[in-house]
Amino acid sequence: MRMRPTLSWTPTEDPQPGSTDPEPVAEALSAGGVLVLSGAGISTESGIPDYRGEGGSLRRHTPMTYQEFTASARARRRYWARSHLGWRTFGRARPNAGHRAVTAFGRHGLLSGVITQNVDGLHQAAGSEDVVELHGSLDRVVCLSCGASGSRRDLARRLEEVNAGFEPVAARLNPDGDADLTDEQVGDFRVVPCAQCGGILKPDVVFFGETVPPRRVERCRELVDGATSLLVLGSSLTVMSGLRFVRQAAQAGKPVLIVNRDPTRGDRHAVTRLTLPLGTALTDLAARLDVPVDLPVDAGAAP
């Protein structure tokens, strides 16, 4: 499955009106077997912006495509300089109430699984298990030549060693961990090669225009087949890699429920779209179903 570089989506018909009634979502959760599909919107309360919501990064930022990254050494230098800086902030993000509620639903036996389009690892940090990372994770890097994989933290140490004094101030952070820097700020930032073969290193995430690994896609299809319903959290479903699972569920007659403030590309397949803030909505749903949600470990962490 190739992740199409679709950066925007405009409804071709009147969008389905949103709802503030959580009852349909509560009923689905109480029945169990719910498969969660999460997007960038669930991480905004952790300080990570989304792509397409109000203030979303696509209003000012075009993500790197796979084709650009592989074809241009200059593009790779720009990417790694921005990503190296963004990683420091990205790595400090903590799970918010929405992530913790999803974990609580899972522990309470209400979920059949979690698929996330995010690359931030916050579902796992909140305690969710067996999360399918549809678009990979920024925690890992992979060599495009020999296929060796490694830790992003190890790469960060290597980059710091060869770029001593690299401390620009970024204007913003984007959902892919890429910080906004000017070409002047990127300067002569040095990129390091694969330690095993000298090849090109890439974050182990699916760039726009890149193919999602087939086995991962098949695993997601199996999860949809085995679910009772599909709950979409914080995704506009603009990219086909997520939307096709919504279509699969709807074609199988399984209820699709969406929690997202703005209209989505999957609304026509959904029985409801709840327009409440995710953290509030999921925490209230947990209380309604008498599901205890863990409090933040650190009182100073993100809500």
Image (tube, rainbow, N blue to C red):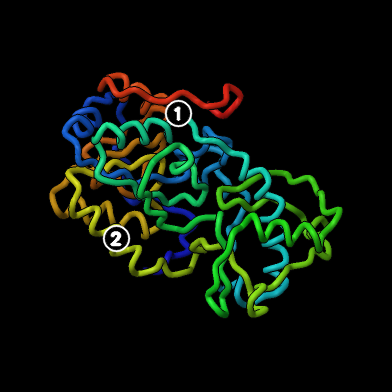
Query: Given the image, on which type of amino acid does mark 1 rest?
Result: Ala
Which of marks 1 and 2 precedes in the sequence?
Answer: 1
**What's the distance in space between the residues labelled 2 and 1, CA to CA?**
27 Å
Residue at figure coordinates x 42%, y 25% from the top left: 294
Mark 2 in CB contact with mark 1 (< 8 angstroms): no
Q: Where 221 sits versus 198, above or below?
A: above
Q: Quadrant of the N terminus?
A: bottom left
Q: Residues within 10 Å of mark 2 (few under 14, many from 20)?
A: some
In this figure, which residue is indicated by the disc labeled 1? 97
Q: Which mark is residue 25?
A: none
In this figure, which residue is indicated by the disc labeled 2? 219
Residue at figure coordinates x 42%, y 46% from the top left: 39
Percent position (x, y) of residue 90?
61, 45
Can residue 173 be seen at all in this image of the molecule? yes
Query: Given the image, on which type of amino acid does mark 2 rest?
Result: Arg
Which type of secondary structure does the marked residue at label 2 adopt?
A: helix
